[in-house]
Amino acid sequence: MTEYRELSEVNKIAEELIPKMGWLDLPRIKFLVLIADRSSYLGKCSKATGKWRHLTNVDYVIEVWDNYWATATDNQKRALLLHELLHITSREKDDGTIVWGIRKHDVEEFLRVVEQYGAWSLPLEELLKAHIEYESSKQEI
C-alpha cells in the first residue's frame, strides 16, 4: 500500500534551498513523503500539468521516499532535495511569459563504462572536476 504525507523537515530544507535556485519566478511546489516498503527512486520531481495544475494550484510535486529519508544524513537530505529542485527549469518567452519545464540530468552513464573508460565525455569530465574541487575544499576547512 502506498501513502503520501507531508513532513515539515522536507519543507524547511527546501525553503533554504529555493532562494538559491535562480528561477525567473517561484513555482508552486508541493513536497510529499512517499510511504512504501519499496520505491524505484529516492526522490522524484513531477510537473503538474493541465487539469491537475488547475485543480491543485500546484506546478510541481517533489516526493522523497520515507525509508531513505529516515536514515539519510542531513547532507544526503539536502543533496536529494537540491537534485529534485534542479529538475525544475524556467525560461522567458519573447512576450515575457515564463515557461516551466523539467530538466534532465547533466550526466547519465553506466558505472561500468566509467570503470572501464574513465571520464570519457565532457559532462563526465566536468563532473569529475566538480568532485575533485569539492573534495579539496573539504580538506581546507
Image (cartoon, rainbow, N blue to C red):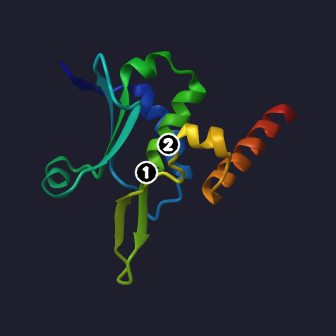
Q: Amino acid at mark 2?
A: His
Q: Quadrant of residue 35?
A: top left
Judging depth in this view, the residue of 36 and 20 nearest the camera is: 36
Q: Position of residue 139 (x, y in %)?
A: 84, 32
Q: Position of residue 86 (x, y in %)?
A: 48, 50
Q: Position of residue 4 (x, y in %)?
A: 25, 26
Residue at x 58%, y 43% (from the top left corner): 113
Residue at x 71%, y 42% (from the top left corner): 131
Q: Quadrant of the N terminus?
A: top left
Q: Which residue is mark 1?
A: 87
Q: Amino acid at mark 1?
A: His
The residue most toward the bottom is: 94
Left or right position of 21 against 92 = right
Q: Which residue is mark 2?
A: 83
**In the rendered image of this protein, does residue 36 appear above or below residue 20?**
above
**In the rendered image of this protein, does residue 94 appear above or below residue 37?**
below
* Label 2: few (<14), some (14–19) or many (≥20) C-alpha neighbours in 10 Å: some
Do the residues under discs 2 and 1 have CB atoms within 8 angstroms? Answer: yes
